[in-house]
Image: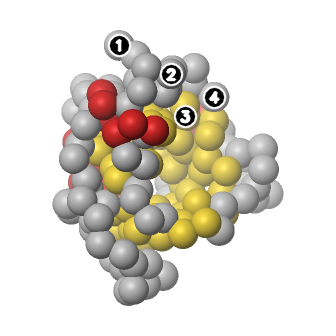
Amino acid sequence: MRAPIALSVLIVLMGAGGAARAAERFEGNTVAGRYAGTNRPFSEHHHPDGRATGHNRGVPNTDACWTTTADSVCYYYGPRETRRTYCFTVERSDRLYILRRQPGGEINAMGTVAAGDTEGASAGAPAWNCDGLISAAPPSARLARR
């Protein structure tokens, strides 16, 4: 990406009601982009039932789920015993979404939101259920702090 992002034009989606706005934009749509630092790709279709089909760094999702808290969008992977949880605040600059790690605020990734399942991630994806329990992660997992 060649155009610099001016922080002054960023619209913060998280905060009071921000998670709801992010959920509205993500639900039923595909969030795709690249991770900061590694420039590796990701693309996830956000199902209304909490599943996130697609891939991270080229590795297909087989148990990825997403949810929102009061101030973050969170993703969790794996069974409760070994669950990995990652939460992010979301900022928007025109079409670009910036995901910042919580806690800490470092930029984790940047991407765009496209309507529907643009890459066909749902086709042939294995079935799984999302329990919505990000607090069921092991104590060592990173969770959003309040």
**Mark 1 residue element:** loop
As shown in the figure, which amino acid type bears the numbered disc 4?
Answer: Glu
**Mark 2 residue element:** loop
Sequence-wise, which precedes: disc 1 or disc 3?
Answer: 3
Q: CA distance from mark 1 to mark 3?
A: 15 Å
Pointer 4 with pointer 2, Cβ within 8 A: no
Pointer 3 with pointer 4, Cβ within 8 A: yes
Q: Which mark is residue 114?
A: none
As shown in the figure, which amino acid type bears the numbered disc 2?
Answer: Ser
**x and y, in percent, of residue 59 in the image:** 61, 66
Front label number (1 vs 3): 1
Q: CA distance from mark 3 to mark 4?
A: 5 Å
Say which quarter of the image contains residue 83: top left
Q: Residue furthest front?
A: 81
Label 1 sits on residue? 146
The residue under the point 44% across, 65% down is: 62
Seen in the image, is 115 located left or right of residue 4? left
Crowding around mark 4 (Cα neighbors within 10 Å: few <14, some 14 to 19, many 20+) is few
Say which quarter of the image contains residue 73: top left
Q: Is residue 143 positioned above or below 74 on the image?
A: above
**Mark 4 residue element:** loop
Q: Which mark is residue 100?
A: 3
Sequence-wise, which precedes: disc 4 or disc 2?
Answer: 4
